[in-house]
Amino acid sequence: PFPYLHEGIHSYQDYEDVFCPPDTRRSRKDCVFRQSKENGTLASRLERFVFDYNGLDPFDVHLALQVPMLSFHTGLPLHITQIYNTTDSQGGWNAIAKQFLGKTLEDKGGKKGGVIAGRSYPRRFNSKLVSVEAQRRICELSLLDYCCLNIPLPDVCKGAHYTGDDGEKRDLFCTLNSNRYIQPGILPNNTLT
């Protein structure tokens, strides 16, 4: 649906050449665990996509919000006993193990850990090249997850940067509608400043 995302990239090697340019490596193996060396090409494609995407039609599992997956089709929530943030997957898995097994996870060598790593290799684009405006748009698009899962907004998304229905600048917020469903107080559109 957004052909510019893949423009000029026809294989994984083409993609790898963007985040790990040939002049920065001795072999392709150098690219596996190294931080991205991309020059902004991928970040600029992400930015364009973030402003073109309406947030309503996820065409990839990574674009789907978490809250709908944790709800019945009626909008009522599934019974969930605990939510953990993947930025501390080891802590989350150890808390679950302690709660249900009475002890934290240990591997065969007696060391703590043995949990799934959140990411086995570095990001493929340089996130430092993503503009503040694009970061705020991402918060706007994913506001429902922030509200319903009680995740604090990143600092860059706090403050009166968004235009409400009344034309006033305001913070991002959620509201309870007349059917008692949580919904974004500001719906995603192109009103970001």
Image: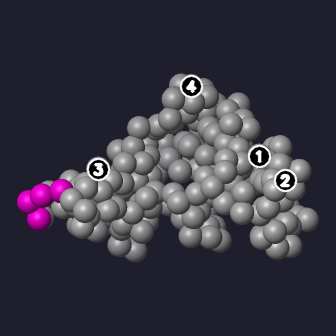
Q: Are marks 2 and 1 in contact (CB under 8 Å)?
A: yes
Q: Counting residues from the N terminus, which is met first, the one under dot 2 or under dot 3?
A: 2
Q: Earlier in the sequence, mark 1 or mark 3?
A: 1
Label 3: which secondary element: helix
Q: Indicate whether 180 appears above or below 73.
A: above
The Cα–Cα distance between marks 4 and 1, rounded to whole angstroms, is 34 Å
Residue 91 visible in the snapshot: yes
Query: Label 2 belongs to which residue?
Result: 21
Q: Badge 4, how many Cα within 10 Å: few under 14, some, many 20+?
A: few
Q: Which residue is label 1 attached to?
A: 37
Amino acid type of disc 3?
A: Gly
- Say which of marks 1 and 3 sits in front: 1
Q: Earlier in the sequence, mark 2 or mark 1?
A: 2
Q: Quadrant of the N terminus?
A: bottom right
Horizontal side, residue 99 vs residue 139: left or right? left
Q: Which residue is mark 4?
A: 160
Residue highlighted by disc 3: 91
